[in-house]
Image (tube, rainbow, N blue to C red):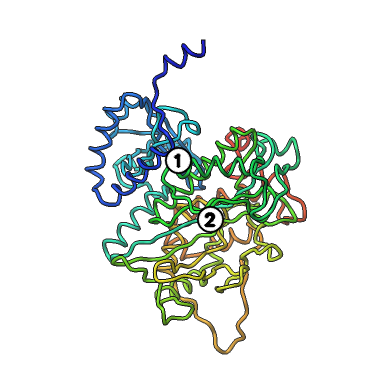
Amino acid sequence: MNGIKKELKNFLEISYDDLEAMNLRAKDRREKVSEALLEREYRAYLQKEKRIKAVTLCFTDLEGRFHMLDYDKKFLLDSANNLTFDGSSIRGFSQQHESDLRLAINWGSIRYLPSDVFGPGKVIMFVDVLNRDHTPYVSDFRSQLKLYGEALKKKSGITAYVSAEVEGFLVDGINAEQRYEETGSFQFISTGGYYHSLPLDRLRQFIDRAAEAQRAMGFKNEKDHPEVAPSQFEMNFSYTDILRAADNIQLYKLVCRQVANNLGITATFLPKPFIGINGSGMHTNISLSKGGKNIFYNTKGKEGLSEIAWDFISRILNHASEICLVLNSSVNAYRRLDPHFEAPNQIKVSPIDRGSMIRIPVGNERSTRIEVRSVAPDANPYMALFTILKTGLEGQLLVKDKEKRDRVRVLPDNINDAIKLFKASDFVGKILNRTNQEKFTEFKQMAADRSPKALGALIKSSEIVYHHEVTNQVLWNKF
């Protein structure tokens, strides 16, 4: 019977080696060919490849949740210019009276998928969310990041490059986050530490499988390893332009969650799911390029950085407290900003001190960058990267009072203080749009109100189950 079923389904399955070659070729084409030509090419490919039955389109809501819709291939090709959805059903998007939103396919974002992770017969593409009149939707930060990057390139010839070190934990059981109220705790699957686990234990099996899938999807992984804390992992993928880097973050987390689920465990990106050990961060490395040259680099500059880089750092440090909510957007995230565990809670820059919000890694003409260490792995990557880039370029420089002793400032240690600073900031309203500032404040306050104001020594179930990557409509509607 199983043999008969298999013969009935002739869906596309591609080897990992071929997938990697196809995805890297697609990345290269995206950087060299116009979107209009890419649309013609990929339309022709979808029409020709009979074994593809569905196309997955994906977007990210205001808080950072990843949404996917599967479209029948034939329907998509016929209706690609008129795809709509109910925005009022997406938390953080439109209100009921303005519910209809459009989806515009970003054809150059295509990825060919490993069938053992995503199922056979599918490809995935990102979309821009548009208003009814085809203008960009203000709360879709992927399209906002894309537009800002394009404008920066056109006006100044500058391209931003990013890589993110996304840490996470593996915990025992499926849907362990959703079941936290029942269990009251998470269970490690491994007690190994930094670089240390047996070759075939569950942590290593997970890392191997997830990294293999990511390489096949064109991530160009550089290294994959257990992290400092027990059951913690990190897989590093290569530097790329800022928009693709944000796409990679969302796909990285999706792959990790699915691979873990296949192994009967849960990959969680909660910043601090365990007390007494290091939390998970998303150290964000960024540099600017112009004319093919890294303009953050200056061999004669302090720490090898140019004045442009130092100004970029100064602006981020100046506005650090105001933008903290964007980079640390959950109640649980403020447990991670603990100086006892290499946490980057100090608003300063340093080449060596890992407690600094910004670190200057060792680099050369090609690799010089700055590392924003205070970003949590549950942040909306598009909103976070948009905020870092725009603040670094458009914020006010930090001015020190020479008459006063230089004291190190620290980031907020709880979400309520971060919300107040975010809400009151004219700068935040200017760079993110007042509408987004108000909506984001409202949603973060709702989560904060469902948790005790003092974090205390024990993780509360409320900070898990009402987390924006965990909670669902049924749970919210109980209030």
Q: Secondary structure at mark 2?
A: strand
Q: Residue furthest right?
A: 457
Q: Are marks 1 and 2 in contact (CB under 8 Å)?
A: no
**Residue 307, percent from left and from top:** 41, 78
- What is the count of numbered marks? 2
Q: Reply above or below: 178 against 378.
A: above
Dot 1 or dot 2, earlier in sequence: 1
Q: Residue at x 27, y 64 (%)?
A: 155
Image side of residue 197 versus residue 397, left or right: right
**Residue 302, percent from left and from top:** 47, 81
**Residue 231, percent from left and from top:** 67, 47
**Residue 248, percent from left and from top:** 45, 48
Q: Reply above or below: 441 against 256.
A: below
| Residue 9 falls in image quadrant | top left
Q: Residue at x 51, y 43 (%)?
A: 65
Decide: few, some or many residues near mark 1? Use Cα within 10 Å; few <14, some 14-19, many ≥20. Answer: some
| Residue 416 falls in image quadrant | bottom right
The disc labelled 1 sits on which kind of residue? Answer: Gln
Q: Residue furthest bottom?
A: 403
Q: Nearer the viewer, residue 437 or 3?
A: 3
Q: Residue at x 34, y 43 (%)?
A: 130
Q: Nearer the viewer, residue 307 or 456?
A: 307
The disc labelled 2 sits on which kind of residue? Answer: Glu
Which mark is on residue 336? none
Which mark is on residue 165? 2
Q: Reply above or below: 38 against 310.
A: above
Q: Nearer the viewer, residue 273 or 397?
A: 273
Which mark is on residue 95? 1
| Residue 54 falls in image quadrant | top left
Which quarter of the figure is the C terminus placed in? top right
Q: Residue at x 59, y 70 (%)?
A: 356
